Structures are given as structure tokens and as C-alpha cells.
Image: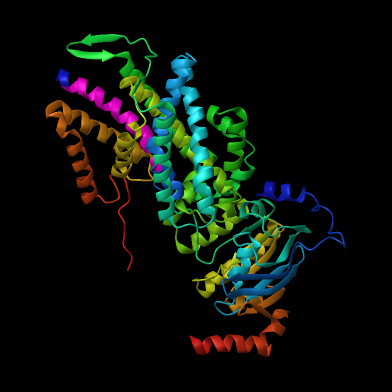
Amino acid sequence: MAIFIQQLLNALQLGGIYALIALGYTMVYGVLKLINFAHGDIFMAGAFIGFFLATYLKLPFVATLLGSMVLTALLGVTVERVAYRPLREAGAPRMSLVITALGVGLFLENFTRATVGAEPRNFPRLLETAAWDLGGVALTSLQFLIIGTALALMLALRYLVRHTLVGKAMRAVADNPEILGLMGVNVDRIIIFTFVLGSTLAAAGGILYAQAYPVLDPYMGIVVGWKAFIAAVVGGIGLIDGAMLGGVILGSTEVFVAAYLPSTYRDGIAFAILILVLLLRPTGLLGRPVVKKV
Amino acid sequence: MAGMAADRAAGPGAGAPPHPAAPPLLEARGVTMAFGGLRAVEDFNLTVQRGELVGLIGPNGAGKTTVFNVLTGVYRPTAGRIFLGGVEITGLPASAITRMGVARTFQNIRLFGGMTVLENLLVAMGFRAGYGLWDALVRSRRFREREAALRRQALELLDLFRLADKAERPARSLAYGEQRRLEIARALATRPRLLLLDEPAAGMNPQEGEELMQLIRWVREQFDLTILLIEHHMPIVMGICQRVLVLDFGRTIAEGDPRAIQSDPRVIEAYLGQQEVS
């Protein structure tokens, strides 16, 4: 039982981080119907930006977190402006956008490797960690902080998307992109805002991840990004709640498989679950079933 | 709704009778829209004075909806110029043209189906919300007041269209006629000067068509609107339009009084030709 509770906390911690990144995939998909494959590398960039802020500017945790969120948002918007928008305006097929996204990802990885170096960096510990032992369950304040921050950000996002006008506009683009302009809404602004939100959450995910697993390298975004993408699909791509649910499911699967089975099975079983979920529910757990009209 | 109408009346140029030399509300000069080799609309000229209700008719594929798409900024015309109240709007993005007072409905209903009826209106009101994102995040007083005012206006508008009791339902769950009414309400939510209605009576039976005609008349008076109407149902066109333009193969083949148009040989030929094909 103690082990179970322990692992549950680990699962929520990892799942929360996956969920933060998955939200970026799902929001951009909702608005542009584009899988932004560079998003995992935006997460990596967020972690590295945090690393520099914390190591060289000696910023404390909150300042590092906020600073990285702002700078990473700038990076995300730059990618949108430079790489995606010109293609959209030229009416390029969606496949070109996806390929461009892959290219942007590779660019970010290799640019980071060229400038920062390929050797792993240690992310400084920014927080005094208190630990308690409750009947065999080791609780750390770091775990609560990560879970709490992830949860707070997700609740803020949920509020924003449901109750503010810009959030309503985001849902309106997802619902019927062609007519939003005719409602007097500047669609490009809504798209930029979506990239700001996604990149901000990815940066937060990067900082939290680096607090839990403090080794950074330029390729760290690949596997984490894939898993967050899978989380978004399992939950139902395009759905905010789906990304959160998918993140927690994927995090839990990994943690519990590693806890009770040889850890080499971890990713294999996690991906098998993905395939199984999609076989049973092709539009994801929260997705609307597709009705084929004849 | 009295509030909205009053706001409009207080707007520039509204209170006093229109100046004799006032520019027409809408003017299209030599507008051509080509898609590759196909000229969907060719040398289209139209002048609409403030307060007019003008009909746009013609067989299927004549280019009527293309005219709407050009006027609202969905397409940028290949040639020609468009003016709204004397200000050139040629090539402006759709959102800017909407903000300047042009709203429309669609031939095939295009609502935000997954969003609620009320949210459909709020999205259309969003650009004049008068508060920023920051206000929304910290729930400032300004945000709460403006948000409450928008909701009130939206609910008033829904009430006028007999949709208030369905405000929280997803738009796609409404009945067909209700969806048509919601589209008109949503167009009005942007507070247009010029309203473009694209076959509002499509798919309606004669009685529903009659009700719709009364609704259009009423909306026009209540909101002090100028209306451009695409319609196939001749009784409706004859019943409410003051002037009619007939398009065929992208060209304007006749223009004038509805009754005179009806007996124009070119118009009869255009419609009979279509009947032979279909």
C-alpha cells in the first residue's frame, strides 16, 4: 500500500508534466489542425532557457519559471511567424506544414547542440526540498510543488478557454475557422495567442521536469514530446480536458509498469496502451465518435 | 434591444436625415472575381443607399455568393473597387470589414456548432468587448462590468429572436429554422450598418418563408439597417425588395423594379435556361 501511494504521487508528478506539454499539442491542433512536431523541442528550449536563467543570472525558482515561460513564448511565436504563417498564407497543403514542423524541431535540436554543446547539463536545484516519512511513504515538498504548479496552470488555462472572450474565440476557430474573421475577430491574433499559451505551458513543463529529473540535453524533447503527443491523442486531440487526462494516464502507466515490472518494459507497455486505446476509441477517450455520413 | 437601437441612433451621421450629398452606403465599381480562367463575377456595379433593401437574384452558379464573399473580404477581387460609406474597403481583411459594419449570414448555415447559442453571439460581440486579456485573468471590475453588459445585450438579442430559452444549448442542437434565426441574430451582434443575407429562406416552407419575410422587415426597421438579399423564393423577393439585380454567368443582366424585372425577357431566358439544364 505504501508503495502504491508512493507510486501514485510519482505518477501524478510525471503525468502533470506530460499534460502541460500535451496541452500545447492539443491547442495548436484544435486551432490549426496541425500537429506541431516541434513542440517537444519547445519544451527542451524552455528547460534550457531556465537552465541559463538559474545558472548564470542566479534567479530563484519563481523568476526562472516565469522568465522561461515568457522567453519560450517568444520563441514559439517566432516559429509561428517565420515558419508556419507564410505557408498558411500561401495556402500550402497541411502535409507541408507538418513536414515544416518536423524541420523546425530538428533545427531547434541541432541549433541547441551547436551552441550549447551535446554534453548533458545539470539543472541547478532551485528549491529547498523538505522530505517527510509517513508510514513508509516518502513525501517531498518538490513533488507537491510540481503537482500543484501543473494543476494550477491547467485550471487557469481551463478558465481562460471557457470563460474569456479570447478563449471563446479559440474554440470558435477550432469549431469553424473560415467564418471567425466575419465575426470581426482577427484570426492571426488568436493563432498567436494559442502559440503563446502552448509554449508557456511547455516551458513550465520543462522547468518542472528539470527539477524532478535535473539532466538536460538537446535531445531531451524528442521522447518527452512524443509521449506528450501520445497523451494528447489518447485523451482526444483538440480537447483540453483530454490532454490532461491523457497526460495522467500516460504518466501513471509508465510509473506503475516500472514499479511492478522490469523497467525495460516501461515504454513498450505505454505505447501498447496507446494502440489499444486508439483501436477501441479512435478519437481518443474523450473524443466524439466519428459518425460517417453516406 | 431599445438600448442597442438607441446606441446606433447616437452614432455618427445617424440622428439627422441623411445629407443629400452623403456617399452611398455601399458602392461596387467594376468588381471582377476570377478563379484561374473562370470569371465568377465580371464587371459588377452596385450602389446601395442607406436604408435600401436590394435583392440579388439569378440562377445557381450565377456568382451571387461570390459577390457576398468579395464584399465581406473573404475574397480579394481580381479587379474593381468597393466603398463602404465612401471609404474604400477593397482588399481589407474580413475582420476589418466586419468591424466597419458589414455582417452576413450563409447559404449553408455556418454556426459554431459545438458552442452554446449564447457563446455564438458573444464571439461576434468580442471585438468590441472593451477589456483586455489581463482584465479577464484578474477578473477586474472593468471585466466584470463589460462582460455582464455583453451578456445582457446578447440575451436581449436572443429574446428578440425567440431563442432566449435555448441560450445554453449547443447551437447544433437547434431546429433548422432556429439555426437560421440564430445566424441572423449573430450577424446583428456585430452591430452592422449593412446586412447581407444569403438565401435565408432556403429549405423553408411557404409559411416559414412568410414569417422570415416579416422578421427581415422588422429587423431592418428596428436596427436601422440596409440589406442586400440573395434569394430564390420569388414571392419573398417581390414582397420585400425595393430594387432587384439579376446575375447570370457572373454578369449583371438586369436591374430595377421587382415587377419590371419579372417580365424582362433576358431574366426569363436565364431562368428558363436553368430549368432546361436541371
Total marks drawn?
0
Q: Is residue A20 magenta?
A: yes
Residue A166 point in image, percent of width and height:
53, 40
Q: Is residue B191 magenta?
A: no
Question: Against B234, is A166 above or below?
Answer: above
Question: Against A293, is B63 above or below?
Answer: below
Question: Against A62, is A34 above or below?
Answer: below
Residue B123 visible: yes
Residue A132 point in image, percent of width and height:
26, 9
Residue A191 visible: no
Q: Which residues are magenta?
A: A4-26
The majority secondary structure of the magenta stretch comes to helix
Residue B62: which quarter of the image?
bottom right
Q: Left or right of A2: which side holds B16?
A: right
Q: Left or right of A250: which side holds A91?
A: right
Q: Nearer the viewer, residue B237 or A164?
A: A164
Query: In the image, what residue occupies the spot 68% across and 64% down?
Result: B227
Q: Nearer the viewer, residue A180 or B192?
A: A180
Q: Left or right of A256: which side holds A176?
A: right
Residue B158 point in image, percent of width and height:
56, 51
Query: In the image, what residue occupies the spot 21% across and 32% down?
Result: A254
Question: Against A89, is A71 above or below?
Answer: above
Residue A36: which quarter of the image?
top left
Which residue in the rendered view is the most extreme toward the right?
Answer: B20
Residue B44 point in image, percent of width and height:
69, 73
Residue B200: which quarter of the image?
bottom right
